[in-house]
Amino acid sequence: MSATDVELVVRRRETAADGVVTLDLVEPDGNELPAWEPGAHIDLLLDEGLVRQYSLCGDPRETGTWRVGVLLDPNSRGGSQHVHAHLQEGSAVRVRGPRNNFPLVAAPRYLFIAGGIGITPMKAMAESAERAGLDWSMLYLGRSRSSMAFQQELQDTYGDRVTVWADDERGGFFDLASVLAEPSDGTVIYSCGPEPLLAAVEKHCAHWPDGSLHVERFTAKAPAAETLEQALDTYQVICQRSAITVEVSDGVPMLEALEDAGVPIMSSCGEGVCGTCRATVLEGTPDHRDSLLTDAERASGDVILPCVSHSLSGKLVLDL
């Protein structure tokens, strides 16, 4: 299914918060949908070639329904506007997935830190941890309660395990530094939300043990200045299975050059956050500019996201 598009129908559409709707997607004939785990997302294939990723936020045990929550982004590139304006109950939509780049690893204890619409993967993770009888807590941060989807449901269900912080009620931002000041043995942190939140979480977790923090971004981080300084003007990408060699200049996305040369490769976000275009590196040194791969994956040099990344070697051989 991960490489196949299917047509689903919106069975239910509800308003979850100011500017946020949830869509329950089902097979028209009522068949079961592929299984998924917390952290997974699906691609919605919208009009005019728009492809957008949304985290599944329902119950994995409900095998006939996929639920997503969609924020109407004022800076939308068209995806969330299309969803809010056109996907009503009964609407058909093509879907690809599910894919999980944000899996919940086994741990003695979890701290979930969600910001705004970043609650969508966190909600499914918390419910999974609760069913398994694991120790967990959640910080849910937002501008105002009216804009925070599922906040009342989470508090009603889990009580003190969930701390809801609305900036307009509290008169300012939550003090992450104090919460994250002392590493907690065995605690794994998951965070999803806007870039300022994720940057703050990363900063305050810098002294935690390796592997303690897992984040998911909706938009890509800007490449570091030193990364750009190392860039090659041109390099070759050799696609081993396709027997195609492509010349790429640093100002042109590698993915675009590959597609123009007729190399078959799936893509979606174009920002290095979804992993759809992930390719195996057989030879050469990738110039990683994505916001998805782990430090270990980057260090191994075995994979690359060609939608945003380049090469630090004159020749890069890919399994494409």
Image (spheres, rainbow, N blue to C red):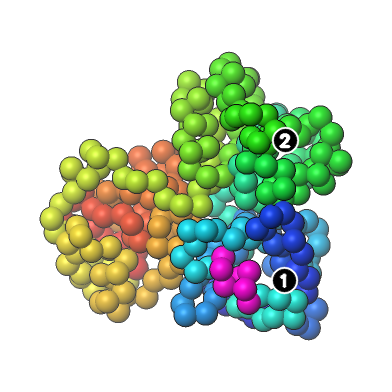
Residue extent of the magenta highlight: 80-86
> In x, y percent, where is residue 204?
50, 25
Q: Which structural element holds mark 1?
A: strand
Residue receiving disc 1:
25
Given the image, on which type of amino acid does mark 1 rest? Leu
Q: If the image is split into quadrants, where does the N terminus sit?
A: bottom right
Q: Residues within 10 Å of mark 2 (few under 14, many from 20)?
A: many
**Image quadrant where one finds the C terminus:** bottom left
| Left or right, residue 68 beside residue 257 | right
Q: Which residue is mark 2?
A: 164
Q: Amino acid at mark 2?
A: Val
Q: Name the residue located 28 percent from the left edge and 63 percent from the top edge.
A: 254
Tell which circle, 2 or 1, labels the residue nearer the N-terminal end.
Answer: 1
Location of residue 80 (image quadrant): bottom right
Instruction: Mark yes or no: residue 194 visible.
Output: yes
- Image x and y of residue 62, in percent: 81, 62
Using residue 129 as the reference point, say whether residue 311 is left or right of it. left
Does 86 sit above or below residue 154?
below
In terms of depth relative to the viewer, which is nearer, 72 or 40? 72
The image shows residue 269 at horizontal and vertical percentages of 45, 63
Indicate the position of residue 55 as horizontal and vertical percent values. Answer: 62, 57
Q: Residue at x 58, y 55 (%)?
A: 100
Q: What's the distance in space between the residues labelled 2 and 1, CA to CA?
A: 28 Å
Q: Is residue 85 magenta?
A: yes
Q: Residues within 10 Å of mark 1 (few under 14, many from 20)?
A: many
Q: Which residue reaches farthest top?
A: 182
**Residue under the point 81% across and 44% down:** 152
Determine whether the residue tagged by mark 2 lies in a helix, strand or loop: strand
